[in-house]
Amino acid sequence: MMKYFLRMLGILLSAAGLVYSGAQGCSSGKSGILKFPTIVAIDSPQSRVFVVDNQRNGLYLVDPISNSVVGGQALLENSDPQVLPDFPNNAAVASLGGGLSRLFVVGLNNGIPQNEIVSLDYNTTGLTLSSFSPITVTGQPSDLIVGLAVDMDDGLLFATNSSSGELHAYDLNSGVEAPGSPIALTGTPGNLSYDSASGRLAVSSFDTNEVTFFEASNLATPPETLDVGVFSRSVALVSNSNGSVLFLSGNQVNIAKVFKVDFTNLAASSEIFSLSPPPASGPIPNPNFLTGNLNQVAAANLSDGRVGGFFTQSTGDLLELDLSSDLNTLNPAVTLIGAISGEGIDTFLNSADQATEVYFASPGVGTLTIVDPLTNQFTKQVN
């Protein structure tokens, strides 16, 4: 197992090329178009980057070619009728036919119900509510819906109800709950990641050491679990011709972990890397990859064959874990942005499903940051 801990427990690291400077000291974007951007959901086939505020009923569309807010204004804002949850906490987007992007949003409400998934349709004519919106998730009105993931292969939207401990699946076109849904899980389910190459859905757990895997195309197949040694906040599953890899950020423990996952024999899966902060009494390592608390993680294949895992941090910096195509060599890196906070993250994919840009939101300064996944270099900020 490869480990990094103050450089002493781990793999040899090159002294150069691991720390990248970004937009440190960037000014607050509160005077810009974006206000409190927290969630990013990307429709790559239709070149649409959706950004959701953590309040104010705010929704924006960013053009990934110009990296600017389309039309110079929000799709939804505080002065519009309340459509989004009062405090959104997650979103996912489906790329449908006829130029349609279908955006799903969940979150907290000042009142109830909050066991709902808001569904919005966007095309060249504008933004509307889907005909079936909202989807009411089975349970109590006060239940909290946390995880969302879109499976375009099987036409499904997955959601976790952390209050009832269940996984739900819905038809993307009708919002109708799929056969075999919901499924009871052990512990409190959290965030989700769907991997098209393996056909698996990964489910994090806020209060157990297990990550659960489902065959998305057949929910009747019993799920399998992998002991990852920590409670998990966010997970990202990705595969190439050499196997599958799970990236995760810890819940309650500030740690990043990477596992090579063997779906033919899950017990043969192995932890290949972990990264945790130095002891409070110890010196700050140089280079320092963990500059803050880890938040969300995304992962994707890259055009040079590598696999990239990308973690937002509370400092607004971006942790990158670059894994070789044979899944045997991993190098950590950090892009220093200094944007006060880093929350939601997603990758823009080319037609070969390879990441060409990484987008993440920083509500503290009202910015959307773009990083090149091949070089880990800061590209631009949108505010």
Image (cartoon, rainbow, N blue to C red):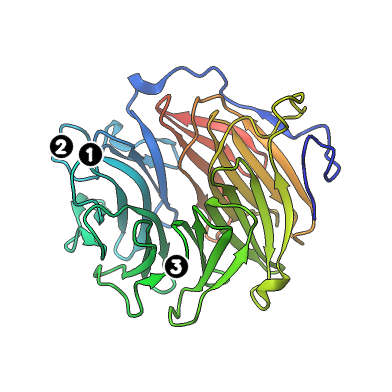
Q: Which residue: 34% across, 72% down?
A: 182
Q: Which residue: 54% across, 17% down?
A: 25
Element type at mark 3: loop
Q: Is residue 201 left or right of residue 48?
A: right
The amino acid beneath tag 2 is: Asp
Location of residue 303 in the rendering, given as x and y in whole percent from the top left corner = 65, 54
Element type at mark 2: loop
Which label number is shown at residue 185? Answer: 3
Mark 1: few, some, or many residues within 10 Å (few <14, many ≥20)? many
Q: Is residue 381 left or right of residue 227?
A: left
The amino acid beneath tag 1 is: Leu
Which quarter of the image is occupied by the N terminus?
bottom right
Q: Is residue 291 above or below residue 320?
A: above
Location of residue 91 in the rendering, given as x and y in whole percent from the top left corner = 36, 50
Residue 173 found in image quarter: bottom left
Element type at mark 1: loop
Which label number is shown at residue 80? Answer: 2
Q: Is residue 27 above or below residue 153?
A: above
Contact between labelled residues 1 and 2, with CB atoms less than 8 Å apart: yes
Which label number is shown at residue 76? Answer: 1
Location of residue 247 in the rendering, given as x and y in whole percent from the top left corner = 62, 54
| Frontmost residue, 243 versus 43 | 243
The amino acid beneath tag 3 is: Leu
